[in-house]
Image (cartoon, grey):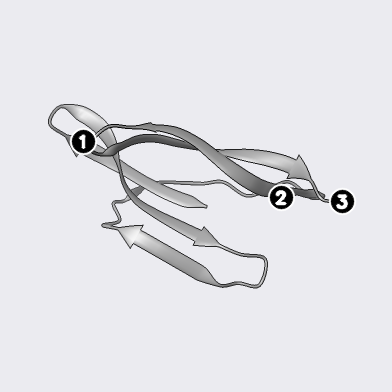
Amino acid sequence: MKLTRGQKDGRTRLFSAAFTTNKSRTVTSGSATSDAVTYTAPAGWQIVGFTGRAGSEMDKLGVVYAPIV
């Protein structure tokens, strides 16, 4: 998962998200900025969910990992 962020109305907001599967398929949304963070599951683990906070816009987004069984 790759997230980009920026300032809007004096607060840091998420501007875009891109999700890439283990089959190299990607879906993206939003307008990317140069301030990016990428989350990759460690070896033997997978991203199974998300956590975050949103009002009228998305403020935070994080990942939940679980072992591959």
Query: Compared with residue 21, is residue 32 higher up or lower down, i.e. above or below?
Result: above
Q: Quadrant of residue 6?
A: top left
Amino acid type, residue under disc 3 in the picture: Val
Q: Position of residue 26 (x, y in %)?
A: 50, 68
48 lies left or right of 5: right
Task: Name which residue lies at 71% across and 50% down.
Answer: 46
Q: Which residue is mark 3?
A: 69
Q: Secondary structure at mark 1?
A: strand
Task: Name which residue lies at 68% across and 40% down.
Answer: 65
30 lies left or right of 64: left
Within 10 Å of disc 3 (Cα), the crowding (few <14, some 14-19, many 20+) is few
Within 10 Å of disc 2 (Cα), the crowding (few <14, some 14-19, many 20+) is some
Q: Position of residue 22 (x, y in %)?
A: 67, 66
Q: Nearer the viewer, mark 1 or mark 3?
A: 3
Amino acid type, residue under disc 1 in the picture: Gln
Q: Which residue is mark 1?
A: 7
Residue at the far left: name it. 9
Q: Which residue is mark 2?
A: 46
Q: Position of residue 69 (x, y in %)?
A: 87, 51
Task: Name which residue lies at 52% across and 52% down.
Answer: 1
Query: Compared with residue 24, is residue 65 higher up or lower down, i.e. above or below?
Result: above
Query: Compared with residue 12, is residue 46 higher up or lower down, i.e. above or below?
Result: below
Q: Secondary structure at mark 2?
A: strand
Q: Nearer the viewer, mark 2 or mark 1?
A: 2
Which disc is residue 33 wearing? none
Q: Nearer the viewer, mark 3 or mark 2?
A: 3
Of pointers 2 and 1, the one earlier in the residue sequence: 1
